[in-house]
Image: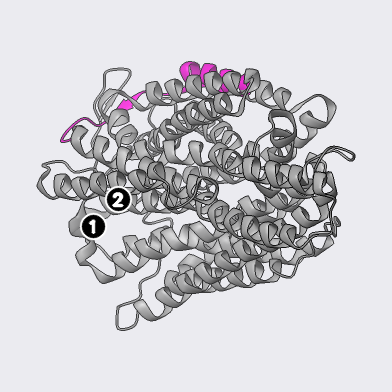
Amino acid sequence: MTLNNGTTTSQGPTAGAARMPGYAGTLAAACGAVFVAQVANALPASLNGLFQQDLNTHGSQLTWITAAFMIAVVCFEFTFGVLGDLFGRRRLVAAGTALVAAGSAVAALAPSVQVLWIGAALNGLGAGAMFPGSLTAITAVARTARERAQAVALWSGFLSAGAAVSPLLGGMFAKVGSWRGSFWVLVGLALVSMVVTLVLATESKAPEGRSLDVPGQITFALGLILVLYGAVEGPESGWTTLPVLLAFLLGACFLAAFVLVELGASSPIFDLKLFRNRAFTVSSVVAVIGMLAFLGACFATSMWLGPVQHQDPIRVAVPFLLLQGPAFLLIPVVSRLLHKVAASWLLTSGFVLMAIGCLLCTRLDVTDTGLGAFVAPALLIGIGFALTVSSVTAVALNSVPQHLAGMASATTNMLRDLGFALGPVVVGAVALSNAGSAFGEKLAGADLTPGELAAAQEIGRAGGPIAVNSLPPGAPGSSAHGLALDALGSGFSTAYLVCGVAALVAAALTAFGMIGLRSDHSATGADSAPRSPGLDGAPAPAPAR
């Protein structure tokens, strides 16, 4: 590995026996960068209601704001890791923060929701570079395994803190100004982080044996984007419309081509041979399903409190402290548990807690604007997530030989983020499809004047029940507001149910899928610290995203 001072260090277990230059600066820069990236990720959660009011958006358009970010992360996560190894992690992180600054500026100036999507996608690209780049940068300059573990724990703490603080930060600035001010604050944070990275961080590379898999990257990105496009647009455009059907068909073709490309690639971004291992396969599947349940519940909560109930952004942010905060506060607890309890049992327990929390949310009353009913379910989901987010990687990595640990870590992280990307898409599709059907049925039997009925039907066809629910009093069609609100409550209750069932499925797969397999404790202790892919072939942690 080559540092920016021209010296070369080994990459084996004894790498960094003497403290490498710039350790403290690199750690500070990495923690700041991952905090900014996670703020960019979670910021829209408390602002969906304001987006809907200011930009006149309908349901699927709001889904795309969140989905655009995560799709960009998932599609290019592997490639960014390779670019960091080839050209330098400090450069990668600095470029990522520049992209976040640009994307946030685009979002702040957005005259329409379509431009806001572009800003979100740019933020996702930037964060996709910052997540692997910052983690690899600190593990490259750590002196010992214990020091590396401590550095990664601090990095994970800032990651979780960004997720917990971001909705509150967005709500505060949106309250004193507008939602656009929240993105300008993010621009400032990103620029400060970029300067800190360029000034303090040590450059490191590991180009040996690393190369880009361009065909794999292209087929994977196109396939995933097309399939998710069909899933997002299906509820409102119609599942049998030509654009939606073509998106699913072409997306499936590109994903099939991706599998074929990876099977013959000399340096695949996604090593399919890993799935010959049952424990790794189980952990990979539950990573997708379980994280879909978590971020799906988060997205449903932001929609329930924002565009459905039109609550103040500060109030919208409060449940997110319970959803995201435990992943930060429980870092030392989970770290100790991973030394004493089999990771598969922690994973199962976490999914069960998430399932209970999601199922409790199905009992929420859409006409009740109090936050008390969210406390218990949000806390259960948050604690469950805290137990699962690190355990899923521990289970995966303990199931493969040491020389495959780097690729296994990268694959598990990508699949976890795929679950995050699918969460809003699936929840949006389920909630909006059910709400649209329920609203149509209620409207058909409603006691409304012909003029009000016609206006509500027209607005409902154009923007769904969310548009009718947001009509000001006295506007044509506003008499159907109560019907739209009830339909949305029913739709998002069904979405919470889907998230709960997904978490239960993940728990069952973990509990029964591991039967007959040797159960190891996580190798995240002081003697065997987590490392990023490409460094000794050792594991990287599963950050709370």
| Colour mapping used in the image | one colour
Left or right for 407, reference 332:
left
User: Is residue 194 found left or right of 302 in the rendered image?
Assistant: left
Q: Quick check: is 208 in the magenta stretch?
A: yes
Residue 150 placement (x, y as % from top left): 49, 47
User: In this orientation, which residue lies closer to the viewer: 10 or 359?
Assistant: 359
Task: Please say whether residue 396 is visible from this viewpoint.
Answer: yes
- 212 lies left or right of 468: left
Instruction: Tell me the element at label 1.
Output: helix
Position in image of residue 447 (x %, y %): 84, 59
Residue 108, compared with residue 67, is above or below; it is above
Type of the residue with mark 1: Gln
Dot 2 amino acid type: Ala
Depth order, front residue of 383/273: 273
Few, some or many residues within 10 Å of mark 2 (<14, 14–19, 20+): many
Residue found farthest to the bottom: 516
Q: Which residue is mark 1?
A: 402
Q: Are marks 2 and 1 in contact (CB under 8 Å)?
A: yes
Residue depicted at 36% across the width and 23% down the height = 203
Which residue is painted at 76% across and 60% down in the image? 486
Q: Position of residue 125 (x, y in %)?
A: 44, 30
Residue topped by disc 2: 538
Against 228, is 404 above or below?
below
Q: Which of these two is toward me, 144 or 407?
A: 407
- Residue drawn at (75%, 34%), measured in percent from left and top? 53
Q: Secondary structure at mark 2?
A: loop
What label does residue 526 carry, if any?
none
Q: Is residue 341 visible?
A: no
